[in-house]
Amino acid sequence: MCSRGQGSTSRDGGLRVPTLLEEFLGVRLGGSPYLRLHSVTRITVPFLLSLNVLFAKDLPSVAAICFLSFALLLLSGAPLRVVRGYLALIASVTIFIALAFMLFTKVPGEVLWELQLLRVQAEKGVWEWSIVVTDASLLRTLYFSLRILSMIFIATLFIATVGDRDMLWGLRRLGLPAGVTVGASLFFRGIGFFLSDFAVVKEAMEARGVDFERTSLAKRFMLYANALIPLLSLLVTRSFEISTALETRGISPGTRLSGSYHSAPLSRGDYIVLGAVGLVTLAFAGWFVCG
């Protein structure tokens, strides 16, 4: 696991805490201007970009969102090998969408290629099943594929730039109840704990002679299912410890947390980034409503 804040500081105060991606994969991201922005900015920007994906209704708009999210991902310093891991998923989903348009839905447009698979002559007419590739079906396939790619870029941007403590500070800054902020922070922290515990259990099973690489898929599934037993036990134990700690400190879902412990103001760069992304979101929303 990466160490907390080696030589890197956050404007939110103190050393920069590891992001969700650093917690999950154990990698260490280098410093970047985007990571020095306020936690409110780093939470709000992916949220606004997600709204833009919903507002995009044509190919140029979704391509612009995909380019913008990818540019911000590069600016954040996130390792691109994380995105490369999703290429197989993107390719399979794209193929599925294309087959759905070509095999089961005839999209009106200029026919580029057609292949008749089945022709049935009946009393009331002729029923045909054909593969029809039109320009409109290709454009729709590209449109949905770019939307999926944009969502992957935005999700990667979020987990690569936001940590569980950033989540807590940002949501508190937005004025949300204590139950929501603490619950969200514990949820993401729990994922990191689960992955860490799973790695420990897997190493223990390998030390006892279990070879996951040479084991069949069915046997591997059973091994993972057996590993869930100690993991669930640890989950229950940690949940009890956390609830006891919160109760000891007098924190309940209706508790109002004090904002005096962490009151770092937004900088000019934060306002510029939030204003720019906000204007882009308003433009897409206006295009969605009036276009």
Image (cartoon, rainbow, N blue to C red):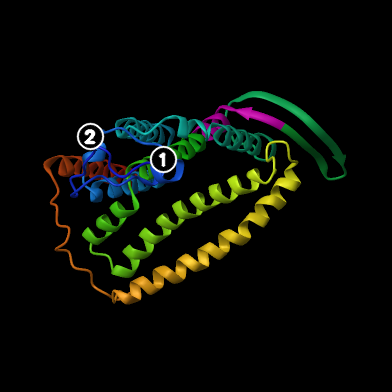
Q: Nearer the viewer, residue 97 or 167?
A: 167
Residue 140 part of the magenta-drawn span: yes
- Residue where numbered disc 2 is placed: 33
User: Callout 2: 10 Å neighbours few (<14), some, many (20+)?
Assistant: few
* Residue type highlighted by circle 1: Thr
Q: Looking at the image, is mark 2 or mark 1 earlier in the sequence?
A: 2
- Disc 2 marks a residue whose amino acid type is Pro
- Disc 1 secondary structure class: helix
**Horizontal relation, residue 104 to residue 49: left or right:** right
Residue 27 position in % (x across, y down): 41, 37
Q: Main secondary structure of the magenta part?
A: helix
**Residue stretch in magenta:** 131-142
Asked if residue 57 shows in the view, the reply is no
In the displayed structure, 240 sits above or below 25; it is below
- Secondary element under disc 2, as helix, strand or loop, is loop
Q: In this figure, which residue is indicated by the disc labeled 1?
A: 156
Rendered location of residue 43, percent (x, y): 30, 49
Task: Indicate yes or no whether the magenta region holds residue 255.
Answer: no
Which quadrant of the figure contains the N terminus? top left
Along the line of sight, the residue nearer the viewer: 206 or 74: 206
Relative vertical location of residue 276 with respect to residue 239 in this rendering, above or below? above
